[in-house]
Amino acid sequence: MNLSTQITTSCFPAIAKLAAGSCVQPAPFIFSFTPTSATQGANVTITGTGFTGTTGVSFGGVPGTNVQVLSSTSVRARPAGGASGVVTVTTPFGTASRAGFTYAGQGTAQSINMATIPNKVFGDPDFALLATATSGLTVTFSSSDPTVAQVTGSTVRILGAGTVTITAQQNGNSTFAPAATVSRTFTISKATQSITFAALPTKELGDAAFDAGAVSTSGLPIIYSSSNENVALVVAGKVTLTAPGTATITASQPGNSNYDAATSVSQTINVTLTLATNNFSVSATGETCRNSDN
């Protein structure tokens, strides 16, 4: 055996075996499970090692339901009935057992009362979910789309526009059976936005390109356009002066997945050209000639 052979991180280093230079997953081993007493259908979380690829969990010799491999060291399952006794985890690499489980029967029935959730608008503040179980046990919540509405405890934070379902559940304990889940669906609409765009000062041809200064309440970038690019041209978001005259600069914001488009706002810009040589001047509004020799 080549002792320099590396064992992959998916193996449990303390008891991993090497065969032909490769890592072999060890048989499972159970450290503990909680709760140690549960009713039919209540979640039981088992902690140990070697749980990758778990094919079954049993309680008192009766196969459990809703088996979930949370990680290589954690499995969750629900007693489907049966008897007290040994908890068993089976994987393709072996079986692990630990005694001490008490089956508490079907348990006392309970139900969940959950308030409806009104529709929201993107940007609305966090809000609390209202739900109680007739058992008095704590109700937990989950979101069908955490990118739209994120649930922490019983508080919802809106992260985007869309439709989302919040589900309330109560998994029971050694006295109460799990409650039927209750769900509430609501819609988060896009927020409106507006543009503030102040009047533009008169500019002199030759002035540097400038930011027209419009802002949106959403904070999204403004898009500018010019009605007369022969006078004022928008380049890389800035207004560049090209000739004397008048142009209308329009500020727009098309919105995104969370904001509706803003109503466009326009301002007029006057570009002047002044030349002064021997008392001869030209302005954008006309031409005058003055010469002391004439």
Image (spheres, rainbow, N blue to C red):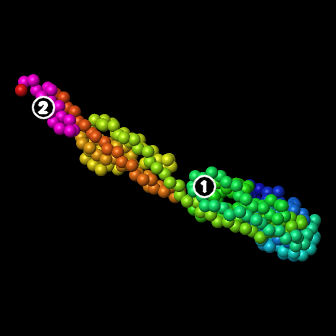
- Residue placed at 45% from the left, 56% from the top? 261
- Residue placed at 61% from the left, 61% from the top? 119
**Cα gap from disc 2 to disc 1, whole angstroms:** 65 Å
User: Is tag 2's residue or tag 1's residue first in the polypeptide sequence?
Assistant: 1
Dividing the picture into quadrants, the one containing residue 41 is bottom right
The residue that disc 2 covers is 289
Label number found at residue 159: 1
What secondary structure is marked by label 1?
Answer: loop
Left or right position of 104 against 1? right
Quarter of the image that includes the N terminus: bottom right
Q: Can residue 234 be seen in this view?
A: no
Q: Which of 33 and 7 is in front in this view?
A: 33
Residue 51: x percent and y percent? 79, 65
- Residue placed at 63% from the left, 58% from the top? 149
Task: Read off the magenta span.
Answer: 278-293
Residue 18: x percent and y percent? 78, 62
Q: Can residue 207 be seen in this view?
A: yes
Nearer the viewer's eye, disc 2 or disc 1?
2
Residue 269: x percent and y percent? 31, 42
Furthest-top residue in view? 292
Q: Which of 257 and 16 is in front in this view?
A: 257
